[in-house]
Image: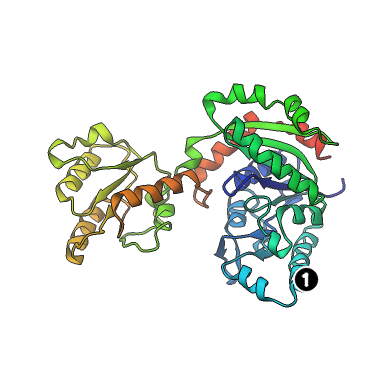
Amino acid sequence: MKQKIVYIAGFRQHAGKTTTSIGMIYTLSKIFSPDDIGYIKPVGQETVEIENGKKIDKDAAVIKKFCLPNLELQYVSPVQIASGVTKQYLTAKNKKAITKEYACSIYDSITRMQDKKIIIAEGTGHPGVGSLIGLSNADVSKMLKAPVLYLAGGGLGKSLDMLTPDLNYFTTNKAEVRGVVFNKLFPQKLDEMKEYLSEKNINEIYRRRKPLSVLGYFPEDDILNRPSMALLLRKFSEAYFKGDITAKAWEKPSRSIKIITLPYQILEPQEYLNSGDIVILNASSTRRLKKILDYNETLENKIGGIILSCSGKQKQSVIEEKADLLLKHGLPFFFVPQITSEIGEIVTKAGENTKIQIYDDDKIEKIKTMFDRYFDTEKFRQIYGI
């Protein structure tokens, strides 16, 4: 079989590209040996540092951890659009040479995977991300001769509103979209979405020269959107904490976020809090904090953690006192200098855009289950020639 490359693109950042890459590799592993499957993140935006000091896209690290343990990380993340790259490119006199150098790096990565039968290429952001440097998702898909699997999402109108300009963008840039997955659909409206976004209706709407194939309808799953305390900590530019943030309790997905503002006298934690909940509380609320901690001790499965607002003039000694108290109870916690409402906004946004982390074992199993149930593997193999 001639080597195949499938390019995963989506309607925006956090559309589910990494989740889909994980699910695709899991699905393909039932057909091929993992040694025959490759992965590349041609253009990345968020990086982590690996052992040799090289920076690679964080999604590549997730793929290695959960899908392809023999993945050579130093080769699968050839281009990163880090902070400052755009300004450097705009002021450069040799823009074409820079784009060519980037492209050569991507080709070099693909060349190193010549022994692979199929490669999953994960795109970044919305379709136009990278266009300034000549490496949009459409540009890279065309460069690699990799047909696109496109992720649409949201409600009925939103899915179609996003799909229309994005399909035109790929077509204009001579990149081929063969299949579409409708992702993050409202679970209670899944059957309705299947009816209105049927393959027949989609192709009647767009009337493309080559028809689109619908490969799955995936409901939004609350588990995949649950952030851990470790992830939330990184969302704040300034924070104070104690404890081992690599401990399992820091990495556990939260259940929900609860902002506690009730007066101490009427606060009944058992009426508001459940195992796995993350609590947002003003750091000055000593009695409320102790009441919550006492309740936590009655739970077999503890609450997920506590975020304390110290936006006022709390003395460091007071913060240290509460930190020591929380340490004794073994709960993840951190203090941040925002008011509780601002913390709530940041945390809520994080929950809406939670990415898979290298410790999210439970989420990986959920992704596999969803692909077994909702993805049309046979149709995928047929239209992508696998």
In the displayed structure image, the side of residue 253 where residue 319 appears, left or right: left
- 4 and 139: which one is in front? 139
- Residue 112's spot in the image, x, y percent? 78, 62
Point 38% across, 39% down: residue: 256
Within 10 Å of the Cα at label 1, are there few (<14), some (14-19), or many (20+) other Cα atoms? few
Quadrant containing the N terminus in the rendered view: top right
Quadrant containing the C terminus in the rendered view: top right
Point 27% across, 37% down: residue: 299
- Residue 313's spot in the image, x, y percent? 20, 63
- 294 and 100: which one is in front? 100
32 over 56 or under it: above or below: above
Can you tell which quarter of the image residue 315 is in?
A: bottom left
Can the viewer see residue 348?
yes
111 over 345 or under it: above or below: below
Q: In this figure, which residue is indicated by the disc labeled 1?
A: 96
Can the viewer see residue 29?
no
Q: How is the image coloured?
A: rainbow
Identify which amino acid the numbered label 1 is placed on: Lys
